Amino acid sequence: MRCPIPSACTLFVDFDHTLYDSDAFLRGLHRAMAPSVSWRRFHSAFERLTESSGDVPYDPAAHLEHLLRDQLSPEPIGARLAEFVERRSGAFLYDDAKSFLDQMRSHGCRVELLTYSKRDVRLSQLRSADIMASFDAIHIFENSRGEKVDYAIGRSTGDGQHILLDDHPRILQKIEGTHLSGIRIRRKVVKKYIGREPVLPNVSVVENLTEAESTILAMMSQAQHG
Ligand SMILES: [Mg+2]
């Protein structure tokens, strides 16, 4: 089924845990860059860094420099990290991601990436996964996770359907009462929400991108037929 009005649908799509297995990336980073450090220490430093960072995205260079400062100076860490991210990080894209993006565009959706990340890291991951050309636009927010959803809400006031696809309840909670429709992809259990998942009215829940595609096509069809 092809949408008869191109770009009548705009899909805003998240990256971490939506298109990309960010946990597998972290394990790969550990194996490649810091095998002398235990996983336990590597992961707890990651958690401390991300919990204390406020509105600054995860910085793998700062993480590695903290763990390896007794062994290496920042320059070789930076060079090895750039090589890993540029050449090997594409392997952690979920298997269903590229075909999903291409299918959405073939159905007439405009696809925009909305992501909260260090810019150079995200661009390297996108290049490594060979999906730069799968988006109509790429927006990387480095200052605040909230800017991402504010951007999508700001864009969804005109005609046509606007859909936000994200894994995180905290992001999807913010779209209530706006013109944005939400789809939550449940790739992983979010630890802090176990047993107390927030209620997300008007947000569809899917388990993978095949289900997301069917849900989006149903939304488009419903919008066309009233
Ligand atoms: Mg995410």
Image: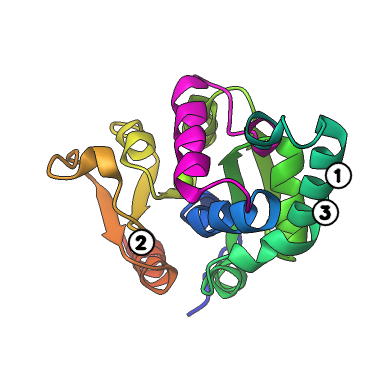
**Residue holding disc 1:** 79
In contact (CB < 8 Å): disc 1 and disc 2: no
Q: Position of residue 52 (x, y in %)?
A: 47, 20
Disc 1 versus disc 2: distance between alpha carbons?
46 Å
Q: Is residue 175 above or below residue 161?
A: above
Q: Quadrant of residue 221?
A: bottom left
Which of 216 and 37 lies nearest the eye of the viewer? 37
Q: Which residues are magenta?
A: 35-63
Q: Position of residue 107 (x, y in %)?
A: 55, 71
Say how many tags the image has.
Answer: 3
Q: Is residue 58 magenta?
A: yes
Dot 2 or dot 3: first in sequence order is 3
**Residue holding disc 3:** 83
Q: Quadrant of residue 192?
A: top left
The residue depicted at 61 percent of the width and 48 percent of the height is: 113
Is ligand 1 closer than 8 angstroms to the Cβ of mark 1?
no
**Residue holding disc 2:** 219
Q: Is residue 8 shown to the viewer in this render?
A: no
Which of 163 and 91 lies nearest the eye of the viewer? 91
Q: Quadrant of residue 104?
A: bottom right
Task: Provide the secondary structure element on which disc 3 rests.
Answer: helix
